[in-house]
Amino acid sequence: MKSLSSKIMTAEEAASLIKNGEYIGISGFTLSGYPKAVPEALALRVLELRKKGEDFKVSIFSGASAGDDCDGVLARAGGIDMRMPYQSNSSLREGINKGVIRYMDQHLGSMGPMVRSGALPRPTLALIECIAVTPEGRVYLSSSGGNSVTYLECADRVILEINTIYGEEFIGLHDTFIPSLPPFTRPIPISKVDDRVGSVFIQIPPEKIAAIVYTERHDKVNPFSPPDEISKTIASHILDFIHVEHQKGRLPRGLPYQSGVGNVANAVLTEMALDSRLGKVNIYTEVIQEAVLPLLESGKLGFASGTALTLSEAAQRQVNQNISHWKNHFVLRQQEISNSPELIRRLGVISMNTALEIDLFGNVNSSHVCGSSIMNGIGGAADYARNCYLGFFMTPSLAKNGCVSTIVPLVSHCDHTDHDTMIFVTEQGVADLRGLDPISRAKLIISNCAHPDFRAELTDFLNFSIKQTRKGHLPVCLDRAFEMHLRFLQTGKMLK
């Protein structure tokens, strides 16, 4: 790296190159592969400037959420003007819900094209974690793909964090292909989960590199928790349903799986490793989670394609020790590819995502609490739900220690409409909504998915609405649609 040696500097020196008002495109996707040292140094700089009475804020584009040593420190320092397309940090969430940080929730698969087309401001700076960079400008990414290629190509200046916890054995994990924009778009030549169509590195002009910072830090990801009984029951319902669909010939064997993040999603993957009815499991998803490792160790993982390896520190160390062998089972893509509608349909993905709340008519809220407060965001769930071969939305039937029903008359915010949902699963059971009219859907959701404590009230709402709307196609009595939500806001409980 002789010709780039003059670019090597401390995180503080690199942070001093960042200008007020910049749009920064960062690497990272769901707590993996995000920059760590420079954001922390920038947050300290913001605080020092504020003491002098100077305002300093930047806007941040990412792949998805970043760790607390990026999103959190900058949010607490008051250094973020606008953030998109997804987040999961409590400090950042607080700033968004207070209205001091602008936030745009965005389908993850469309973020890159919107930046490349100019529909969104192009980042002036790309801040990217990588494994290595060559004097010719070949950048080798770390534990996530995200939108890194887009930001590296679009930004005028680049700051690279080279994370030395990754050895050269990690090189080769990535496939950095992204498609051309219309009218030059061509079919993406991927027909199997393990197909590769791009390069293992990203080529950028070396003169764009403004700084290189060396770090040695793990992604901050919470340790994997063993599934609780409710999550295991939901997982069992899903696997039983898939088995019956196989037996009836309605579901081809060997289709790849997509799984969202969270305890329930991890439980499904964990139970797959124990299910003798399944053969080799292939995964085409966004986040390759820690629960994939038991599949790998048991010999049941065929291949896993994603845009991020999101693992606890212990699992990161485990992968580091075995990467020369295990990387033959993984590929990390840009999220335009992991979340491509074209590929999700072609591969016949079986999609499993988590809901915050589900209503009687098949709509799903996965992003906002009581209609207004952002939780995390829509993420990539809709990319899969609308285009998958078979789609599940799953949630425990109760939340907040039993005070909240996740089955409600009408969702307080709609991320996924009834046109894009197929199957709902709670620990109570499964509701297959395919081919059902709204009233039939509602009755099935109440009987199969709602908690017994709430079935009477949900049934009363449905019957009252049918009577009031005179059996309209969608029997929603607006006067009562949000009674349960309003009761929760007033008393802390949805129960009467």
Image (cartoon, rainbow, N blue to C red):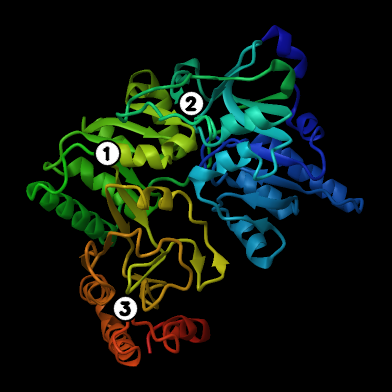
Q: Is residue 30 visible?
A: no
Q: Badges 3 and 2: C-beta atoms under 8 Å apart? A: no
Which class describes the residues within 10 Å of circle 3: few (<14), some (14-19), or many (20+)?
Answer: few
What SS does tag 1 mark?
Answer: loop
| Residue at 23% across, 77% down | 443
Give x and y (percent) for residue 410.
40, 76
Q: Residue at x 29, y 58 (%)?
A: 231
* Residue indicated by mark 3: 473
First in sequence: mark 3 vs mark 1: 1
Badge 3 amino acid: His
- The residue tagged 2 is 177
Give the amino acid at mark 1. Answer: Pro
Q: Which mark is residue 135?
A: none
> For the residue marked with disc 2, what is the amino acid?
Phe
Residue labelled with disc 1? 256
Q: Position of residue 426 (x, y in %)?
A: 27, 65
Question: Dot 3 lies on which element?
Answer: loop
Against 475, residue 20 (above or below) is above
